Amino acid sequence: MWLLSLAFGIVFLSSFIFMAEQTIVFLILMILGSFGMGFTCPNRFSKRSRIALFVVAILVLVFYLIVLWIISGALSNISSGTTI
């Protein structure tokens, strides 16, 4: 189980590296990473810490989506010739 959470964690972090890629694949990987980190943590973590990690992962996902939305809006404004 901890290998699964490690794999999801690596996917979760690697999607930040490729943040410029605005594809649906990375959004799916972000969602899988956040759920994987929240639910498949090693059993040495208490239930409270697993829930806290899941909440943090969801907050990071929301932050990522907001930043992606801002970037895509800024790019569309720049390409249409208007200023931000």
Image: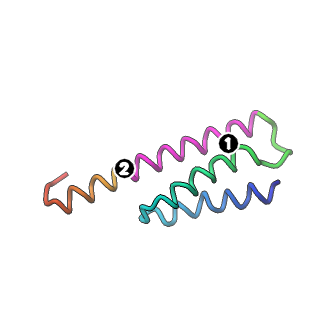
Q: Amino acid at mark 2?
A: Trp
- Above or below 62: residue 17: below
Q: Which residues are magenta?
A: 48-68
* Mark 2: secondary structure: helix
Residue 1 position, x and y percent, is: 82, 54
- Residue 22 % position (x, y): 42, 61
| Residue in view at x 59 percent, y 59 percent | 13
Q: Quadrant of residue 3?
A: bottom right
- Residue 5 colored magenta? no
Look at mark 2 in the image and give the residue it sits on. 69
Looking at the rendered structure, the number of numbered marks drawn on it comes to 2
Kindly report which numbered mark, 1 or 2, lies closer to the viewer in this rendering.
2
Give yes or no for residue 64 being in the magenta stretch.
yes
Q: Residue at x 15, y 54 (%)?
A: 83
- Vertical side of 73 occupied by 48: above or below: above
Q: For the residue marked with disc 1, what is the amino acid?
A: Leu
* Image coords of residue 40 (percent x, y): 76, 48
Q: Secondary structure at mark 1?
A: helix
In the displayed structure image, the side of residue 73 where residue 44 appears, left or right: right
Q: What label does residue 53 carry, if any? A: 1
Of callouts 1 and 2, which one flags the residue occurring earlier in the amino acid sequence? 1
Position of residue 4 in the picture relative to residue 12 (left or right): right
Looking at the picture, tell me which residue is in the foreground, 84 or 72.
72
Q: Residue at x 66, y 62 (%)?
A: 10
